[in-house]
Image (cartoon, rainbow, N blue to C red):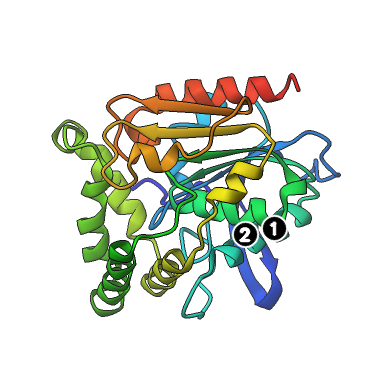
């Protein structure tokens, strides 16, 4: 069976918690990095393995760092009842400091986008750029908040396996459920490695996140907003909330909520082009 995480390193942070992560740079090169690293954050009930098809496309473009978020993959699952987005952001901050990385280009998928926005609000000085991939700066609607409560209850009562079996098919474009059966199963398998308690705490944290559309509008760093034309989780208009000369909006035709799996070549092309552009400014 393929590994459920790409992590090839780990560090211990406050309270003895482990943050597992993939780093394309060897540990021997641990001096302060003068070049921004490209950091990729995965979605809910995922892991660094969400990016396994994108990695070969972009790894020659920059130093690539891909953590497993708390409660996911090979990282620790704290016993907190709620994982606030700010807490995820501080985990990333501690990881960057431990690795002596000063500046990053941050790419966040779904939950990872919410974490990226929290990081941008707290540590904008550490950002070279920000990209939201199938994510939004908008808060949950009242209906979505109720669904977060239902998700947390299902995780607490039934565990992770039945939950991800129900969740994952909703992440793909309907046309891909038959044509990409193996890929759907792969994402289910990755999700099975998530802590049920950690996933429930994450659901509560997503429910509690604030509206960050104004903050996104205020950022003057390069922004890349990527949406899928068939995304049934986050509508295109909820991703494309910012405009301006520093904002690029990309619609990936035919993709649902998982373009890194459904259309990895196209996503890789767009991300690679963005990283190349950043190297010129």
As drawn, the label of residue 122 is: 1
Along the polypeptide, which appears first: circle 2 or circle 1? 2
Quadrant of the rendered image containing residue 140: bottom left
The vertical placement of 56 against 139, above or below, is above
Q: Residues within 10 Å of mark 1 (few under 14, many from 20)?
A: some
- Residue at 62% over, 24% down: 245
Q: Nearer the viewer, residue 149 or 182?
A: 149
Taking the image as shown, residue 256 lies to the left or right of residue 34, namely left
Q: Nearer the viewer, residue 5 or 173?
A: 173
Residue 82 image position (x, y, % from top left): 48, 75
The vertical placement of 120 against 275, above or below, is below
Q: Is residue 237 visible?
A: yes
As drawn, the label of residue 25 is: none
- Residue at 51% over, 48% down: 113
Q: Is residue 8 visible?
A: no
Taking the image as shown, residue 242 lies to the left or right of residue 178, namely right
Q: Nearer the viewer, residue 129 or 46?
A: 129
- Residue at 31% over, 24% down: 253
Which quadrant would the C terminus be assigned to in this image?
top right
The vertical placement of 105 against 233, above or below, is above
Indicate the secondary structure of the residue bearing disc 1.
helix
- Residue at 29% over, 70% down: 146
Q: Nearer the viewer, residue 132 or 101?
A: 132
Decide: marks 2, 1 in contact (CB < 8 A)? yes
Residue 52 image position (x, y, % from top left): 45, 37
The residue at which mark 2 appears reads as 89
Quadrant of the rendered image containing residue 230: top left
Indicate the secondary structure of the residue bearing disc 2.
helix
Distance, label 2 to label 1, CA atoms, is 8 Å
Q: Indicate which label's residue lies in the foreground, 2 or 1.
A: 1
């Amino acid at each position: 069976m393929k590994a459920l995480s790409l992590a090839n390193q780990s560090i211990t942070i406050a309270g003895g918690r482990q943050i597992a992560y993939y780093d394309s740079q060897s540990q021997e090169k641990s001096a302060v990095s003068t070049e921004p690293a490209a950091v990729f954050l995965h979605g809910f009930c995922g892991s660094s393995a969400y990016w396994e098809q994108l990695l070969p496309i972009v790894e020659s473009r920059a130093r690539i760092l891909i953590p497993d978020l708390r409660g996911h993959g090979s990282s620790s699952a704290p016993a907190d009842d709620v994982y606030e987005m700010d807490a995820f952001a501080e985990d990333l901050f501690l990881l960057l400091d431990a690795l002596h990385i000063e500046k990053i280009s941050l790419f966040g998928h779904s939950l990872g986008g919410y974490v990226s926005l929290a990081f941008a609000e707290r540590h904008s000085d550490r950002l070279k750029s920000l990209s939201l991939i199938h994510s939004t700066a908008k808060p949950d609607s009242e209906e979505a908040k109720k669904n977060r409560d239902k998700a947390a209850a299902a995780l607490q009562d039934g565990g992770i396996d039945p939950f991800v079996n129900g969740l994952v098919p909703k992440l793909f474009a309907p046309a891909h459920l038959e044509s990409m059966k193996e890929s759907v199963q792969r994402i289910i398998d990755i999700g099975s490695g998530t802590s049920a308690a950690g996933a429930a705490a994450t659901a509560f944290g997503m429910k509690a996140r604030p509206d960050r559309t104004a903050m996104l509008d205020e950022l003057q760093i390069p922004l890349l907003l990527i949406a899928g034309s068939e995304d049934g989780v986050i509508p295109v208009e909820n991703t494309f909330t910012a405009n301006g000369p520093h904002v690029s909006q990309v619609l990936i035709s035919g993709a649902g909520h998982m373009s890194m799996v459904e259309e990895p070549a196209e996503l890789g092309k767009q991300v690679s082009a963005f990283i190349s552009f950043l190297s010129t400014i």
